[in-house]
């Protein structure tokens, strides 16, 4: 059995990469991928902790299935918004979208 620390290290690496992508990249698609990396880090953590504390229960897997469904919905809505922004402005750089400010 693989120790839980390996899963948690992988989750921290994915979380760090996701946060780095959100903070440094201004391309909307890259920011969306960074958010997906953060979702994956959370899912790995939930599965690892559920397997470590209750190996026979499937509660962790059920929670992860719901978060995967929510992440898929978020990705579809995010890509739809990015397509609309690209059609209106011709670019998906977040810094150039000044007309969206209230």
Image: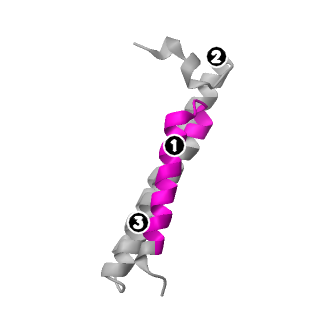
Residue furthest out toward the left: 53
**Percent of width and height locating residue 96:** 58, 17
Q: Is residue 65 above or below residue 56?
A: above
**From mark 3 to mark 2, how far is it between C-alphas?**
39 Å
Question: How many neighbours does mark 1 have within 10 angstroms: few (below 14), some (14-19), or many (20 or more)?
Answer: few
Q: Mark 2 or 1, which is nearer the eye?
A: 1
**From mark 2 to mark 1, how far is it between C-alphas?**
26 Å
Q: Residue at x 57, y 29 (%)?
A: 26
The residue carrying mark 2 is 89
Question: How many neighbours does mark 3 have within 10 angstroms: few (below 14), some (14-19), or many (20 or more)?
Answer: many
**Percent of width and height locating residue 101:** 44, 14
Q: Which residues are magenta?
A: 6-31
Evaluate whether residue 65 shows in this view.
no
Say what secondary structure mark 2 lies in: helix
Say what secondary structure mark 3 lies in: helix
Q: Residue at x 54, y 45 (%)?
A: 34
Q: Nearer the viewer, residue 86 or 34?
A: 34
Q: Nearer the viewer, residue 40 or 63?
A: 40
Q: Nearer the viewer, residue 97 or 21?
A: 21
Asked if the residues shown at circle 3 and circle 2 are in contact, with their CB atoms under 8 angstroms apart, the answer is no
The residue carrying mark 3 is 45
Question: Looking at the image, is mark 3 or mark 2 earlier in the sequence?
Answer: 3
Question: Looking at the image, is mark 3 or mark 1 earlier in the sequence?
Answer: 1
Asked if the residues shown at circle 3 and circle 1 are in contact, with their CB atoms under 8 angstroms apart, the answer is no
Asked if the residues shown at circle 2 and circle 1 are in contact, with their CB atoms under 8 angstroms apart, the answer is no
* Label number found at residue 20: 1
């Amino acid at each position: 059995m693989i120790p839980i620390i390996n899963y948690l290290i992988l989750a921290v690496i994915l979380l760090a990469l996701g946060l780095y992508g959100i903070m440094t990249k201004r391309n909307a698609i890259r920011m969306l991928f960074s958010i997906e990396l953060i979702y994956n880090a959370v899912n790995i953590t939930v599965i690892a902790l559920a397997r470590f504390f209750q190996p026979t229960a499937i509660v962790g897997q059920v929670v992860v299935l719901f978060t995967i469904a929510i992440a898929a919905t978020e990705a579809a809505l995010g890509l739809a918004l990015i397509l609309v922004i690209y059609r209106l402005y011709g670019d998906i750089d977040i810094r150039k979208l000044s007309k969206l400010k209230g």
